[in-house]
Image (spheres, rainbow, N blue to C red):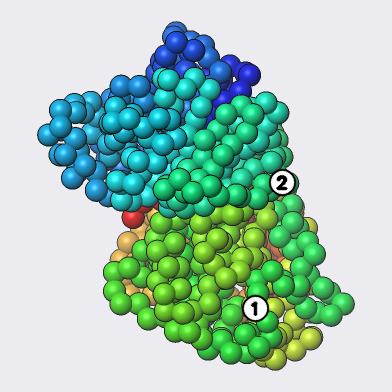
Amino acid sequence: MCGIVGYTGKSAAAPVVVEGLRRLEYRGYDSAGVAVHTGRGMEVVRALGKLGKLSEALAERPLAGNVGIGHTRWATHGRPSEENAHPHVVGKVAVVHNGIIENHRELAHELIAAGARFSSDTDTEVIAHLVQQALEDGARTLHEAVRRALGRVVGAYAIAVLGTDEPDVIVAARHGSPLVIGFGEGEMLCGSDISALLSHTRDMVFLEDGDVAELRPGGATITTVSGEPVSRATKRIEWSATMAERGGYKHFMLKEIHEQPDAIASTLRGRVDLEASDVHASEIGVTPEVARAIRRVYIVACGTSYHAGLVAKYWLESLAKLPTVIELASEVANRDAMFFEDDLVVAVSQSGETFDTLGAVKAAKRAGAKVLAVANVLESAIPRLADGTLYTRCGPEIGVASTKCFTAQLASLLLLAVYLGRRRGTLGEAIAGEVLKALVAVPGHMHELLGDADYVRSIATTLANAKDVLFLGRGHNYPIALEGALKLKEISYAHAEGYAAGEMKHGPIALIDAELPVVVIAPKDATYDKMVGNVAEVRARDGRVLALATKGDEAMHDLATHIIWLPEAPSWVLPLLTVVPLQLLAYYVAARKGHDVDQPRNLAKTVTVE
Ligand code: G6P
């Protein structure tokens, strides 16, 4: 995982780098460090813990200079510690790295045999040694030395390198991990994603695998690892820096929950055609012929995105009449997953970088399947590999626990089901029109739900001490039960489990007693009557029930211990609504416990390791 930043220009580098790291902290936050070229040589400050610790260390030992690199870490090789924090310095070279060097052991043995001494347990340090060795062996520039070093390593990397002898240069390179370079006025930056650079520039180049860039304040030259010049188009990014600010909310997660009405409106903008009862999505490259030729949809995803995929299965099967398989992307690699040429493989990923999802996409491509990405981060690895991308367009999501991207994924996947259904002739104008009208009304309903946030906060007190919580739902509400449980688990550290209510009798009913809170998703839809039965069974065993029910449902009101009201809405869009109070519930439980909601322990937002 990890986030990297580099700056060369006229400003003091350390504050710019730390500010960039702050925006990348979602990628990892167990230690951090900065190296700055002072004009006479390099100085490094590193600290164990979150970025605040690095800032404290820098306050004690300020680094003066206009060129610097920095890193925020999520440990893979070597436990979190100051020694293992980046940058790693060897001789005249400092390196920050995101990724994994697979042959680091062989390289380290070879370097140690040649006299090198290692001061960390990281795989990254071999890169610093190799670059230093290349300089000692006569490489004329840092760029050349880095290229020589990269010729030796196998694995994934995005790196930024400083060298003592070239005071205004940063060498940045990528292979398999993301890296963007930004063109400011008289200054150049690089970073793991665009949010780290946005307060300086919106003009960016997304490096390709194998690119090695030399950045100086006046511009960049890019070559391949073997030194052939390459040219990359500059893109103008429409996100603004303030989109990545907390804007008065205590946590990014709370802000992002409240941004959902706008996020959905943005996902839908320009895509919904109510007059024609159709969806415009030519960017996904699925022509009517292709849509008709698809025999099966195969969804791959991880975490919250997987739950969005589970909901999409209901829509794709009923609206587009497409058999839909959904699999955890991490499991695709554990067996001989079968993809076919007439499959549409849909990779759902907020970051577009998740290692396992990327791996599943590669397997699907090898089998000749058509791959569609549903992603939020522009130009990330999965969209680059896919044949087309439906961007969720909900702006940067910073909180580690995904919220607005989940509902934007749902909206995108419902659009996809309508789009495919219309092109395959399985979905008539009338139903398509109903679904789209319901989708367009979602932001309004979300506003209503968010208006009750204080009430959800008061209910959260009843869950604050629970060690276990069970979430139940049926049909399209079942994935929402899974998601509600995941949200609570991720940020409150309570054990929470989502279950298909129909399975309750096959196990979880044994857990029910007066202590176990059971959250039940029971809107007035096709699953309602059976859910009433489940609630009665829980109550008969003295269980406590928090029900999500449609406004005016007196029966549920009488049965449940606590109730959260849902607006009346067509069944198609209920998953986009039922999840909102569950997000708020998880948030308020965790906030009440005083947890670091945006950066929960042990988690990271972008999981670029297996
Ligand atoms: C991590 C994040 C989750 C996310 C999952 C998949 O576990 O903490 O919030 O759902 O990765 O990420 P993706 O970027 O592929 O949606």
Above-or-below relation of 190 to 552: above
Would you call the spot at circle 1 few (<14 residues within 10 Å), some (14-19), or many (20 or more)?
many
Helix, strand or loop at disc 1?
loop
Above-or-below relation of 349 to 257: below
For the C terminus, give its image quadrant.
bottom left
Q: Position of residue 303 (x, y in %)?
A: 45, 58
Q: Residue at x 80, y 79 (%)?
A: 277
Q: Residue at x 78, y 61 (%)?
A: 269
Residue 66's disc is: none
Name the residue tied to disc 2.
236
Tell me, yes or no, if residue 591 can be seen here.
Answer: no
Name the residue tied to disc 1.
286
For the N terminus, give its image quadrant.
top left
Q: How many marks?
A: 2
Report the Cα–Cα distance between label 2 and label 1: 26 Å
Q: For the residues carrying marks 2 and 1, which lies nearer the camera in this image?
A: 2
The answer to the question of whether label 2 and label 1 lie on touching residues, with beta carbons closer than 8 A, is no
Q: Position of residue 398 (x, y in %)?
A: 56, 42
**Amino acid type for the residue under numbered disc 2:** Arg
Helix, strand or loop at disc 2?
strand
